Amino acid sequence: MPQTLYEKLWNSHVVADLPGGEALLYIDRHLVHEVSSPQAFASLRDGGRRLRRSGTHLAVADHAVPTRTRGGIIDDPLARAQVAELEDNARSFDVPYRPLDGELQGIVHVIGPEQGYTLPGMTLVCGDSHTTTHGAFGALAFGIGASECGTVMAAQCLKQRRARTMRVELLGQADPLVTAKDIALAVIARVGALGASGHAVEYAGPAVEAMSMAARMTLCNMTIEAGGRVGLVAPDDVTFAYLKDRPLAPKGALWDQAVAYWRGLRSDPGAVFDQVVTLDVSGLAPHVSWGTSPDEAAPITARIPDPATLGADSARRHAEKALAYMDLQPGTALTDIPIQRVFIGSCTNGRIEDLRAAAAVARGRQVAPGVRAIVVPGSTATKHLAEAEGLDAVFMAAGFEWRHAGCSLCVAMNDDRLAAGERCASTSNRNFEGRQGPGGRTHLMSPAMAAAAAVTGRLTDVRDLMAPGEMTR
Amino acid sequence: MIQPFIRVDGPAAALPEENVDTDIIYPARFLLITARLGLGPYAFHDRRFRADGTEVAEFVLNRPEWREAPILVAGANFGSGSSREQAVWALLGRGIRCVIAPSFGEIFQANCYRNGVLPITLPPAQVAALSAAAAAAHPFAVDLEAGTVTVAGRPPIPFSVDLERRLALLNGWDETATLLNAYGADIGTFEERHRRHQPWLFEGENDA
Ligand code: SF4
């Protein structure tokens, strides 16, 4: 029987079949951050348990950390206590830890791949729903709750129900200014915020094969916004080239052995998926979200839809509520929407490729009057690389703030948050009510589009600012 | 540590809204709190309070009839969004032991079971009827042993729960302990085989 990539990954990790159709799944790696781990460590302490394989976990502080300064004492007493608790837990339970002030710190989903911790063929979990990011490497990666983090620590296993499978086939060739983020928003708008519920989504086709690892990570990252449990791309030479010589990737003969195994990690010809979605990305326009659910997104050339024209009742009701919250009127051209804030960063779009794309737009331009724009690299290593390339200077000359690495305005747990009513062009992944601060309004888009919004002060088609040759993916 | 769930009686709060996500149930800024207990005051915080801190009197959980309601009758896709377990802990902190909805966010639902909260999935029409009964302040009884939801004076409505989940809830079993007891040996056997197949996953542990 031909198997899908998901089935191969699943089957190679089943420890036992459980009554009721679930399975006990072996977990190879667990990323630990300060917000979802304290309770898990506490459950270990309460149960008098140790970690089964402490070296398979990797701990780092990212969610709540300030990005204005680094080193020294964290102002917010709660955040300070949370980071201290993570350090203390990592020490007591012998978990590898990336210090906040060190070169290896960053958002869990950025540093995992960057350090070669994420590898094809493995199972990887984290107490954060955007763990789907790591599926870009052909790893079975998904977000879990804090209790499950405790279970993984103690048992290196989780009870899981096998997902259904969906193949998203991306055909054609996208315009150079149209990125994986635009494609992700287009796919989500097509299938709906629940369209991939209970599914493992494999992205395939020529447009995926042509993507860099950064782009594939953006695509897999956003899978959860279509309700998908897992995002996947079959590993190929692009993957292996990215991973080779990363600090935690296998070396020498083990590397060769690993690559030979990884080459088999692809859906067999004739493998059957429960759902197939096909999208031709040729001619696709950059996308932005206009509502409070990630599927409420449209090409930048469009107008705000009239909820009355939306087919399903639930979509209409949601859109009505969303437009009220967003303070937008049906029929408004998306490019007529003014913004006050810009956020470039997050595990969706905080990688070096993303910063380069945004800098290409910012170069020689100025942030519009009345707009506050921040750039928050996804990791400290990314920050330093960007500085070596002079991107920080480009951003600062244009009037952007250049920050330290962390989740920042993606989740608004540190002091970076929107004021009520403020509208933000954001490269993050969620436009839920209040996600970037109570009453804040989020428009999701790509880094280049966010930079374009920063310099014009409104949602903007970046293709109107840039000549096609000015930037490549 | 997990309170067994056998039967819960009391008023049910109706929140017939779709896609109530975990950000609404537990706003992200409170994630800085590292405790599991005592999170009740933060449940639905931004629905219950205005920015100036005053209470929104008409929000269902602020109404005297439903302040202590142990049951929530919710809309489709309740608890969607993130894996944050605080959403469940905050409900528990308010004494909510059971949520009835047409569908749930998947991770949220699993988190419910792990914490002794019973998520009941019923067809939309039944949930709508229960929601109306809840809004009319009829008392509810949720009986896990019998597998029924009953609105006082009406015939019981049956619901189904996965057998293992049901046993764990009835007995208040902790999932980790249950797994380790039942499958400890299998995990060891698997690990040896896995090490032979993908040895690089076992390299250099702890000198990372
Ligand atoms: S950047 Fe946002 S989505 Fe990504 S890990 Fe941080 S909080 Fe989660």
Image (spheres, grey):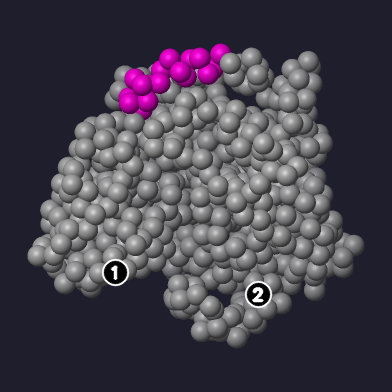
Residue B83 position within the rendered picture, expressed as x and y whole percent measured from the top left? 44, 46
Residue identifier under label 1:
B128
- Chain ID of residue with mark 2: A
In the rendered view, would you say A311 is above or below A61?
below
Q: CA distance from mark 2 to mark 1?
A: 42 Å
Residue furthest to the left in view is B153
Q: Secondary structure at mark 2?
A: loop
Circle 1 packing at 10 Å, graded few (<14), some (14-19), many (20+), is: some
Q: Residue furthest front?
A: A1
Between A281 and A304, the one nearer to me in the picture: A281
Q: Is residue B191 magenta?
A: yes
Q: Give the residue number, with chain letter if any, for mark 2.
A: A458
Q: In the image, which is nearer the foreground, mark 2 or mark 1?
A: 1
Same-chain status of marks 2 and 1: no
Q: Tag count in the figure?
A: 2
| First to last magenta residue range | B176-192
